[in-house]
Amino acid sequence: MEIQPIETRYAGHRFRSRLEARWAVFFDRVGIAWEYEPEGYLVGPNRKPYLPDFWLPEQGVWVEVKGAEELLDVELVVHAALPSGGLPRAPKPHTISEYEVRLLILGSLGRGVQRVRSQKTGQWNGFVQPVHSALAFRKGDLVQSFAVFRDETLRVAHPFAVIADDSPEINWAGQGCEWGNLVRGETAFVDPDDYDVKVANAYKAAIGARFEHGRSGD
């Protein structure tokens, strides 16, 4: 049985799902400015309608929120991420190694930031936090990378898997990797010296947030 999303009110907005509202809570707690569904666009060679879930103006990145990989319209987000025929480019784009980060794909918040113990020594030796997928563009290639939140911003790893180019075709033969936390709750190890209390508390607040039903007062 397919679980239907629950419309949810938060910060003066009516979100289409609880997961989207939880990400808004996270952004607020970590100090990242956000706009919810600011505008819809026609993307791709067939000019298909696409309404991105968030725009992060200070990060210069669009955001798509999906609770599971099977819910993700891969072709649509790829066409949206390509600069030619896709979403507008940011005045100050988020870049990593000359790649322009175009679209961040956020799934479940998982368990947030968790402390981990060494299996060999039994000692607490660090933390893990959710990893998210990002699509970045450079010189005609759209590539996949992984991203984490840290120091009130978005940190994107060096892109590594080419999945499309600036054309109507999508080359999935080159994917060969998972979609961040949409697949198995992927996490990244965080050294104790790099532990970010603000990010950890933001995940905790978002996971535990209580909301009004979206249709109350309509």
Image (cartoon, rainbow, N blue to C red):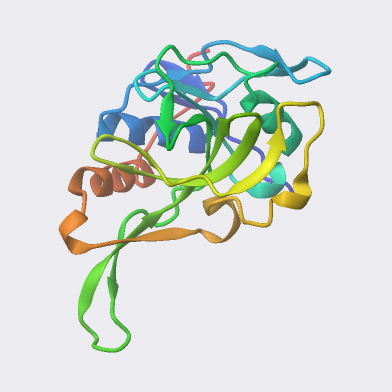
- Kindly identify the residue that appears in the image at 57 percent across and 27 percent down: 16
User: Which residue lies most toward the bottom here?
Assistant: 120
Horizontal side, residue 206 vs residue 121: left or right: right
State the image coordinates of residue 69 (x, y, percent, origin top left).
Answer: 66, 48
- Kindly identify the residue that appears in the image at 68 percent across and 18 percent down: 84
Quarter-wise, where is residue 79 in the image? top right
State the image coordinates of residue 55 (x, y, percent, origin top left).
Answer: 47, 20
Closer to us: 134 or 122:
134
Quarter-wise, where is residue 178 in the image? bottom right
Closer to us: 138 or 218:
138
State the image coordinates of residue 9 (x, y, percent, origin top left).
Answer: 44, 24
- Kindly identify the residue that appears in the image at 75 percent across and 34 percent down: 75
Quarter-wise, where is residue 22 in the image? top left
User: Which residue lies most toward the front here?
Assistant: 139
Horizontal side, residue 124 vs residue 101: left or right: left
Closer to us: 189 or 137:
137
Q: Is residue 98 above or below residue 127?
A: above
- Kindly identify the residue that appears in the image at 55 percent across and 28 percent down: 7
Horizontal side, residue 201 vs residue 17: left or right: left
